[in-house]
Image (cartoon, rainbow, N blue to C red):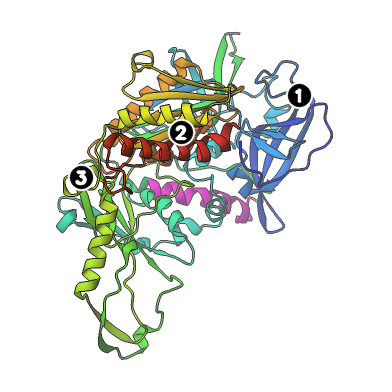
Amino acid sequence: MAKKKHIIEFPVGRGGYWYLFWIGKVRYTNKQRKVDFYFYNKMTLDESFINNIDYNNWVVKSLPVSYLSEYGIGSVYDVMNQKLLTLPYENSYQINIDDIFRMTQNEFPLNGNKYFIRNSEQIVDLSFKYLKVIGKNRFNDRKCLLISPYTILQYLFFYNDKLITKAFSADLLSGFKLNEMKTYNGHGIDLGKKIGEIHYDASKLTKQEAIILAPYLFLKNERGIKFLRSIYSHVHEAFFNTSKGEEAVYLNIFWEFKNYSLSVCGKALHTFDPNGKKVDYLLAYRITHFTLLDQHPYTVDEIKLFPFNARDSTKDRENHDPIDVIRPMIPLTDGLSLNLTRDTVNNAPAGEFINNEEFRNPFHIPVTIEKRNKQNESYSVKHSIDDNQKDDVTREIENLSEFADSVRENIKNLIITIGNFEYFKKVIIVLKEEYLTDSNFGVKEFQQNELMTPFQFVEISYLNRFIYIVEFGNGIIGVFNKETYAQIPTEDLSLFSSEFKDYENEIKNTSKVLWTYIRNHYSRDYIAKGIVIQLGAKHDRPRKDEGSITNKEELIAKAASRTAKKLYETRIISNIL
C-alpha cells in the first residue's frame, strides 16, 4: 500500500475504486510534460473483471510525469481513503533472455479485446513500441508477455519523482562528466580490480541519484548510456521538431540489453488469430525481478564517483596563494568504512557508500562516493595525528568491531558466545512468557523439516493479523508480513525460504548481511507479491561485564529479554496490534 502522495479527483461512480488500465502518451502542456492515465471505475478489490468493472465509466487523466513514481498499470485508487492500492497479482511469469529483443512496433495484440480499453485502436496506435517475449510460470504454462516501456522504467528508477523529471529534461547524463570517464587497474586493496571513475555535478544530482545511474554508464558497448539518453531524446524530437508538430507521443526507449532474467506479474488476457485460434497474453503490470546474467556485463569491477559543485566545495581556492600550515588531525569516523563479516574486518579507504532503503542498484556492482578532503580556502593544510587521537580512533574501531564474528577472539573476554539459533529460541520463549500472554495472541514455530529450510520461521498472530520473523543464524532477525497482514500459506513460506537461500548464495564470500541485502535489492519484488519486507532486528549480545551478574545463563536470558522486548515494541505492536 503506497503512501498518499499524488491525490486524483474522480467523478462519481458506482464503485468506490478506479482501476488504471493503461498509461498512454506524453503531452507537453503549459510548459509541463504530462502523461495520459486511463482509468475504469471498479466495484470491488477482487481481481476478477466480470461484473466488477464499469466499462461505461472510464476517464483519462493527463497528469505530471512525476505521477509515474506511484501509478503503474494495474494500480487501484481508493476514492474514499484517497490513496493508491497496490494489489498482489498471482499471475507471475519469468523468462531468461539470451539475445537482444528490441522493442516491437507491430499493432498491439490486445486491441479489440473487450476487457481492454474501449477504442483501443485509436489509443494504442502503431507509434507505440513495446517488449514482446514468451515467458512461463511455475507450472510451466507459457504466455506471450506484453511489457510497456513505462513498466520497465518504473522498475529501474521511475520510482523516484525527481529522477523522472530529470529523465524528461535531459539531466540524467548532463549531470556527469562523460568525456572525462576513466578506467584503470586498481592498486593496494583494489589490486586485481578494474576501477571506473567519473565525476558528477552535485548541484544537479544527489548522491543517491548518482549511485542509481552510475552502473548504466559502464555497461559494455555503451548500452546503458544509449538507454538513458533515449528516454529524453525521442520525446524531445517529437515535441520540438516542427516538421512533425505532434501534440503527444508515446515514450520510446533504446532497449538492446541481452543475457538477462526478467520476471513480471500482470493480467492474463487473450485474443483470437485470423484462423480463430485463441492466443494467450499477459499484460505486464509490474516487473518483479530483473538481473543481468552475464558474469561481466561492465567494463569495470567497481565504480568510484567524485562530486563537484558541492555546497561545501571551495570554488575560488585557485585565486589564493596557499599558506602552508600543520594542524592536528580531526578524526572523521564517517570516513572509515568497516565491513563487518564472519571472515574479515576491513578498514576501507576514506569513502562513502550510500546504503539507502529508498533505492537500489539492480545491477549488483559496487559504487562508492569518494569524499572530498577537508580544506580551508587559502591554506594548504597538513594534518598530524597525536597519540591521544590515535587512541580515540582505535577505540572507536574496537567498539564497532564487537559486532564482527571475525574479531571475537580479540574480545572473547567481553562477549559470551552462544549459537544464534539457540539464542533465537530463547528470544521466542521470552516473547511467549512475558509479552504474548493475551489469549488472542498465537505463536507458531515452524520445524525446519516442515519448510525444508535451514532457517527458523515463526508466525506471530493477534486475532486475524499475522507477522513473520525468521532467524538466519547470522545474528540479524528478518521480519516480514503481507500488506494486508493476512496469513501466509505454508507453501509460500517454503518458497520464500528457498528464495532467501538463493540470496544467501548470491552474497557468499562478501561483506553483505543477508536481511539487509534482501531489503536493499528485493523489497520491490516482494511488494509486487503483496509482501512487506520490514527492518530486521539485531541480536542483543550477552556480556560478562554486565552489572553484577556473573552466571552465564542469566546473562544470556537478560540479553534475550532485551531482544524480545525490542521485537515486541518495535515490530509486533506497531504492525499487528
Per the rendered image, the range of residues in magenta is 224-244
Q: Residues within 10 Å of mark 2 (few under 14, many from 20)?
A: many
Quarter holding the C terminus is: top right
- Amino acid of disc 2: Val
Q: Residues within 10 Å of mark 3 (few under 14, many from 20)?
A: some
Cα–Cα gap, marks 3 and 1 = 59 Å
Quarter holding the N terminus is: top right
Q: Is residue 120 left or right of residue 455?
A: right
Q: Quadrant of residue 475?
A: top left
Q: Residues within 10 Å of mark 1 (few under 14, many from 20)?
A: some
Q: Which residue is mark 1?
A: 43
Q: Which residue is mark 3?
A: 408
Cα–Cα gap, marks 3 and 2 = 27 Å
Q: Quadrant of residue 177?
A: bottom left
- Whole-percent x, y for residue 381 in the image: 27, 82
Q: Depth-wise, is mark 3 or mark 2 nearer the camera?
A: 3
